[in-house]
Amino acid sequence: MKEIFKVSLRCAESLSLKFLDVRIPKSTLHYWEVKHDDIVNEILRGLFRILSRIEYDYSVIDSTEVTDWLKGLYKIFVNVRGGSALFPVHAKLTISEVEFVRGMPEGEGLMLGDGAFDAKPVLNTIASKGYVPVVMRGLTSQEDTKQDRAYNESLYAYRYVGEGVFRALTVEFRGRKRGKKRKQKLNLRIIICCLRILVRWIYE
C-alpha cells in the first residue's frame, strides 16, 4: 500500500489500520522494506513466470535511466511481450546488456531492440534463448552481421508499440529513490505494474 499510494512510512501505518484493521508500526514496515527484499524478488519472479505463459506475437527489450536522491544515474532494463496485450516478463536494474539478456526467459519469435543491444554476446544470448533478434545496427557496428539480414524496418516499428508497458513502468518509477533502498522500491513498483496488467488480463 505504501508503494501503491506513494506515501511515507507514517502514512502507510495509518493505511494499514484503514484497510487491514490492524495498525502496523512504521518501524516494522521499514524493517520489512529493507530486510525482506529476497521475498520481494521471489514474488516478482513468480509474477514474471505467470505473465510469460500468456500468448504473444513478438518481444521488445529496452532500458531507461532512473535518478536516485544523490542524482546518480542507473538503468532499468525491461523485456516486454506484445500481442493481444502488452506485459513485462523480465526486468533488471543493471548497467550491462549482457547480464540483462542472460536472465530473460526462453521464448520464440522476433526480439526487437535498439542499437544498444547490437553486440555479439547480446545477440548470441538472444538467439540461444530461441528468439530471432531484430536489432538496429549500433553506431560502432561496421560488419554485415546476421541481425542486419534479419532487420526489417516495418517489423522494427512494432518496437514502439511494445514500449507502452515501458511507459507505464516509467510512471511507476517517477520520483527519485533513496540510494540504499532503490532496488527494493523499484521491484515493488514493478510488482504493482505486473499485478495491474495481470488483473486486467484475467478479467477482460
Image (tube, rainbow, N blue to C red):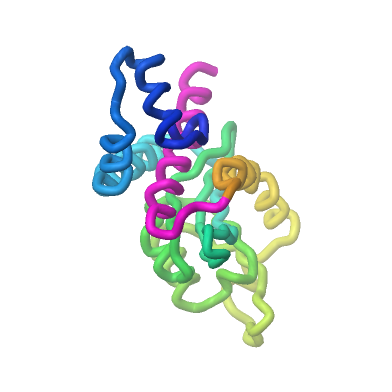
Q: Give the vertical position of 115 relative to 143 (above or below).
A: above
- Residue at 66% in and 65% down: 151
Query: Visible in this render: residue 138?
Result: yes
Residue situated furthest bottom in the rendering: 142
Residue 82 place in picture, x, y as percent: 57, 41
Q: Give the vertical position of 39 relative to 177 (above or below).
A: above
Principal SS element in the magenta part? helix
- Residue at 69% in and 57% down: 156
Nearer-the-camera pick, 37 or 100: 37
Query: Visible in this render: residue 63?
Result: no
Q: Is residue 59 left or right of residue 43?
A: right
Q: Give the vertical position of 56 relative to 115 (above or below).
A: above
Check if residue 187 falls in the magenta segment. Answer: yes
Check if residue 48 falls in the magenta segment. Answer: no
- Residue at 32% in and 41% down: 30
Q: Quadrant of the C terminus?
A: top right
Q: State the count of labels.
A: 0
Range covered by the magenta-colored residues: 176-204
Residue 130 in which image quadrant: bottom left
Q: Quadrant of the N terminus?
A: top left
Q: Is residue 195 left or right of residue 82?
A: left
Q: Give the vertical position of 47 relative to 141 (above or below).
A: above
- Residue at 69% in and 50% down: 160
Q: Is residue 26 left or right of residue 161?
A: left
Residue 172 place in picture, x, y as percent: 56, 41
Residue 22 place in picture, x, y as percent: 29, 17
Nearer-the-camera pick, 138 or 77: 77
